[in-house]
Image (tube, helix red, strand yellow):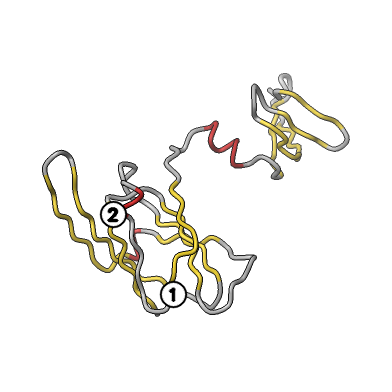
Amino acid sequence: MSCFERTSAGALAALALALAAPDAGAQERAVPPENQTAVAVTIYNENLALVKDRRRVDLTGGLQRLSFIDVSAQIRPETALLSGGGVSVVEQNFDFDLLTPQSLLEKAIGREVRIVRTHPETGEDLVETGTLLSVANGIVLRIGDRIELNPP
């Protein structure tokens, strides 16, 4: 079991960690606040604070991709640190996007989605499955052998 201390003023941070043998198919794992073992906050002038957030993470060998959840969107990304025995950071990214209908659609491009339509007379729901192709200037879906634009 490894314990990591991340010093930051926090946002959602995705960190790819390299351990023994890199694995190209690393799955992303959330590191929620429930994994927190300690937190310390020092408040400074000019809206600055130092947050030491310690969370326990069990790691296996190879490349690991971790997402630290519920961290402040006001983080200064250059101040985020990760430490632990035998761990090195390969890449560090910060996703500041808020959860909106548009951001959900953008993250679903290329994925299978379901569309539910209600028959106006019977009230019966019709569920169709398709692939979301684009959300630029409207929604574009491939449903079976047809392309549908801006479904209702």
The spot of residue 135 in percent (x, y) is 65, 30
Please name the residue shown 24% across and 60% down the image: 52
Question: Closer to the camera, 64 or 45?
Answer: 45
* Helix, strand or loop under label 1: loop
Task: Inspect the image, locate mark 2, and give the three-letter code of the amino acid beneath it.
Answer: Ser
**Residue at image coords 80%, 35%:** 143
At mark 2, the secondary structure is: strand
Q: Residue furthest top?
A: 121
Please provide percent x and percent y for residue 83.
Answer: 35, 69
Identify the residue at horizontal 53%, vertical 36% (top origin).
103
Question: In the picture shown, does residue 117 fall above or below 71?
Answer: above
Q: Which mark is residue 147?
A: none
Which sits in the foreground, 95 or 70?
A: 95
Q: Quadrant of the N terminus?
A: bottom left
**Residue type beneath disc 1:** Asp
Left or right of residue 81, residue 142 in this image: right
Q: Position of residue 123 (x, y in %)?
A: 69, 26
- Image quadrant where residue 87 sits: bottom left
Quadrant in which residue 89 is drawn:
bottom left
Residue labelled with disc 1: 58
- Residue 106, given in percent of the width and then of the height, sits at 60, 36
Q: Rounded to the nearest whole Å, what is the CA distance between mark 1 and mark 2?
A: 21 Å
Image-based side of 84 in relation to 38, left or right: right
Q: According to the image, label 2 marks what residue?
A: 8
